[in-house]
Every structure is written in structure tokens, then in C-alpha cells.
């Protein structure tokens, strides 16, 4: 491992900077697509609420299908080739959108297929990308590194959303996706330029049964006294937000008469909130402890949805929604960086990939069902009533964590002795 001593800035660690830059470029391009795809579906293809929920379902189904084998593969093989291959597949799939638009064959069915393929490839790439960090840096630098990655991710998301609003307005939603294609190519180049030798996976792991290794990962996570309650909290949090975000774009574009520029602005402000949360989390954890930081973030989150429910069309309503989203993403990033650092620190090195993949399978496994439930509820109850129910459900993650033994956790646990 090319270590970064405790007193040395991570900005002087060349390979971490390459890794950090790859994340930034990838997320900037994805921010453009985050603006473009809903506009293609809702505005260009006139999708119904149910059809929008099917697009969300396609994006969120892959964790149930590929998360567990992706984790086992990440522990069996070198992680960088998997990361690079995944981003190239994503770039190729997204390239189909502007090509189909140019040839007059753009359809919801194509969007569903692209969403499914890119989500699956993105998951296969993100599993080794996140679990790769402990092999790049020593355990005591993980919280700092995760905070820096979280900050740039949110800042890049903000830049991508702003860029997306401008590019969509200038070129159209489908052509804007070309920026995401270019970002995947740049990301692959940066990841390929990392020089730190990656530890060779245990050769005995490649000789065993993939199914057995998957089962070992699930058993390890469900039996771990620290990882399990964090994942249960994350499952509740992710499921409720999947329900809400399925309808968020539709409500903004149709009920509040938002435009591409407004959507980009709101997503950009939200991402800046993520930057604030990432920059503050290390000091907050040092001062108050990880449990208090996570519980406070989860307690505040339900209130951040109220501006959306109470807003009227116009700039005043947009400003209120933006403020709520800023705080929401600050809380999400702070608690997310904290729980991720805890999980990485306590997990055995040989289980990092499977721990992350099992966590994604459990945590994100609720999202496809939540998307379909949101589509059905939005169709039967109306968008506002459905969003109100989802807002009430945001209290669940707080109570899940507050009822666990981690409510008294005062510091990030020491890294595994084997790491």
C-alpha cells in the first residue's frame, strides 16, 4: 500500500488524487444525465406517472440481481480492471440515447434498457471502487478520504446539474447525454493511471465456489454487531427516499411547472449541501461522536421535505425547496460518510468487497419495490398525498438507529487488526 502518513495531506498522495478526480469527473457527467433523463421521459416522451415509476424501477433493480456476485468478484479479482471495464460499458450504453434520438428511434423502452444496463454496470464498478479505497490508504485516513470523496462528489453533482440545465436548454435533453459519455472515458483513463500496486487477492479465493463466498459475505454482515444495525438503518433510509425520489421530478415538472433550468438549479443546490456535510463531518464526529452525528442528521431529514409539500409555483417556492434540499443533502452526506467509514474500519480486509455488496443488496434491494409502490400510490392517491406519506415515513430510519446498540458509539472503531 502506498501509505499517506497521518500528518501528510492527502492532496500530496498522487494516486488518491487520481482516484478522487475520477470520481469527480464521473459524477459531473452523471449530474448532466440526472437532469436530462427525466426531461426526456416526462417532456419529450410524455411518460405517465406509472411509466416514470417503471424507469425508476429499471434503474433500481440491478442491486437485487448483481450486487452479491459483484462483491464476491471484487474480492476474487483485482479491483481496478473491474472499475475501468464498468465505466466503459456505461459510456457505451448511454451513447445509445443521442444516437437513437438522431435516428428518430428514441423511446421509453430504450430508456428502460439503458437505465437497467448502466445501473448494473455502475454497481459492478462501484463495488470495487469503494472497497478499493482501504487498499490505497491506511485505516486511520479513511474518514478523511471518504469525506473528501463525498465533498467532491457533491460538488461535482452540483456542477453537473448546473451544466445539465444549461446544456439541455441549449442542445436538447438527448444530446446532453453525450457529456456523460465523455466523462466515462475520462474516468477510465484516470483510474488506469493509478500506480499504487494493488494487493493480489488470495489465490485460494478464486478456487472456491462463488455461491459459497456470497453466502459467507451475507452471513458475515448479518452476524456483525456493528455492520448489521448500520445496514438496517440504511435500508429504511434508502427505501423511503427511493419512494420519494420516484415522484419528485414529476411533481416539480408538472405540478410546480419547473423547467430544465429550475431542475438543474435545485439539484445543484442540493449537491452543494452535500459538500457542506462532507466538509463538516470530520469535525462533527471528532466533537460529538459518530452516533450523535448520524442520529441528528436522521432526525432533521423529515423536515427538509416540507418545503416541497408547501411550495407554490414560482421563485419563492423554488427558493424554499432549494433550502430544504441543501440541508437534506448535508445530512445525507454527513451520516453516509460516517457509517461508511465505520463499516470499512471494522470489516476484515478479505471481506471488504462482499461486505459492501451485501450492504448494497440489502440496502438498495428495497428500491425497486419502493419505485413501483410510489408509481401505484401516485396514480391512485395523487402526487402530493403520496409525497406527504413518504415524508412521514422518513422518521423510520431515526428510530431504527436509535433503538440499536450503536446509539452509544462515541468514536470510530479502530481498523481491523488484519488490515
Image (cartoon, grey):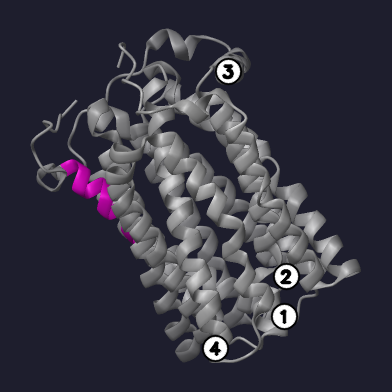
Up/down of 207 relative to 251, above or below: above
Q: In which quarter of the image is residue 46?
A: bottom right
Nearer to us: label 4 or label 1:
4
Up/down of 26 relative to 96, above or below: above
Task: Tell me the residue that label 2 is attached to.
Answer: 108
Q: Which sits earlier in the primary sequence, circle 4 or circle 3?
A: 3
Q: Which of 241 and 46 is in front in this view?
A: 241
Q: Where is residue 44 in the image (x, y as percent from the top left)?
A: 67, 84
Task: Tell me the residue that label 3 is attached to.
Answer: 210
Task: Tell me the residue that label 4 is attached to.
Answer: 316
Q: Which sits earlier in the primary sequence, circle 2 or circle 1?
A: 1
Measured in 3D between alpha carbons, the distance from the residue under mark 4 to the one under mark 3, in whole angstroms, is: 55 Å
Q: Position of residue 340 (x, y in %)?
A: 43, 36
Q: What stretch is highlighted in magenta?
A: 15-25
Q: Which residue is drawn at 29% across and 54% down?
A: 279
Q: Which residue is drawn at 53% across and 64% down?
A: 94
Q: Where is residue 323 in the image (x, y as percent from the top left)?
A: 48, 73
Nearer to us: label 4 or label 3:
4
Q: Do the residues labelled 2 and 3 touch (CB within 8 Å)?
A: no
Q: Which of 408 and 212 is in front in this view?
A: 408
Q: Which sits earlier in the primary sequence, circle 1 or circle 3?
A: 1
Q: Which sits earlier in the primary sequence, circle 2 or circle 4?
A: 2
Task: Tell me the residue that label 1 is attached to.
Answer: 45
Amino acid at each position: 500500500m502506498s501509505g499517506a502518513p497521518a500528518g501528510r495531506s492527502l492532496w500530496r498522495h498522487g494516486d488518491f488524487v487520481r482516484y478522487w478526480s475520477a470520481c469527480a469527473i464521473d459524477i459531473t457527467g452523471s449530474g448532466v444525465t440526472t437532469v436530462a433523463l427525466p426531461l426526456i421521459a416526462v417532456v419529450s416522451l410524455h411518460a405517465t406517472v406509472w411509466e416514470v415509476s417503471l424507469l425508476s424501477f429499471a434503474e433500481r433493480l440491478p442491486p437485487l440481481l448483481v450486487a452479491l456476485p459483484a462483491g464476491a468478484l471484487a474480492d476474487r479479482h483485482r479491483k481496478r480492471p473491474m472499475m475501468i471495464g464498468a465505466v466503459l460499458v456505461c459510456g457505451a450504453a448511454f451513447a445509445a440515447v443521442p444516437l437513437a434520438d438522431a435516428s428518430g428511434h428514441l423511446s421509453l423502452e430504450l430508456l428502460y434498457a439503458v437505465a437497467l444496463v448502466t445501473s448494473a454496470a455502475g454497481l459492478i464498478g462501484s463495488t470495487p471502487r469503494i472497497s478499493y479505497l482501504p487498499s490505497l490508504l491506511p485505516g486511520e485516513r479513511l474518514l478523511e478520504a471518504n469525506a473528501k470523496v463525498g465533498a467532491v462528489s457533491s460538488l461535482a453533482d452540483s456542477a453537473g446539474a448546473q451544466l445539465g440545465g444549461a446544456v439541455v436548454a441549449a442542445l436538447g435533453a438527448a444530446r446532453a447525454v453525450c457529456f456523460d459519455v465523455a466523462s466515462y472515458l475520462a474516468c477510465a483513463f484516470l483510474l488506469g493511471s493509478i500506480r499504487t500496486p494493488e494487493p493480489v487477492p488470495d489465490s485460494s479465493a478464486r478456487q472456491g465456489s462463488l455461491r459459497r463466498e456470497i453466502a459467507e459475505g451475507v452471513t458475515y454482515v448479518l452476524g456483525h454487531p456493528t455492520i448489521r444495525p448500520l445496514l438496517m438503518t440504511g435500508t429504511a433510509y434508502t427505501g423511503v427516499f427511493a419512494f420519494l425520489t420516484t415522484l419528485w421530478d414529476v411533481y416539480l415538472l408538472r405540478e410546480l411547472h419547473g423547467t430544465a433550468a429550475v431542475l438543474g438549479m435545485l439539484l445543484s443546490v442540493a449537491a452543494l449541501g452535500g459538500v457542506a456535510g462532507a466538509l463538516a463531518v470530520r469535525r462533527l464526529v471528532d466533537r460529538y461522536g459518530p452516533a450523535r452525528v448520524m442520529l441528528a442528521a436522521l432526525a432533521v431529514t423529515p423536515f427538509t421535505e416540507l418545503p416541497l409539500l408547501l411550495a407554490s409555483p414560482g421563485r419563492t417556492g423554488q427558493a424554499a425547496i432549494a433550502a430544504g434540499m441543501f440541508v437534506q443533502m448535508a445530512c445525507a452526506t454527513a451520516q453516509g460518510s460516517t457509517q461508511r467509514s465505520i463499516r470499512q474500519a471494522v470489516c476484515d480486509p478479505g471481506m471488504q468487497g462482499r461486505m459492501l455488496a451485501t450492504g448494497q443488496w440489502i440496502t438498495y434491494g428495497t428500491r425497486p419495490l419502493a419505485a413501483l409502490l410510489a408509481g401505484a400510490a401516485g396514480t391512485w392517491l395523487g402526487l402530493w398525498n403520496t409525497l406527504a406519506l413518504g415524508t412521514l415515513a422518513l422518521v423510520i430510519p431515526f428510530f431504527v438507529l436509535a433503538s440499536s446498540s450503536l446509539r452509544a458509539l462515541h468514536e470510530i472503531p479502530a481498523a481491523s487488526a488484519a488490515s
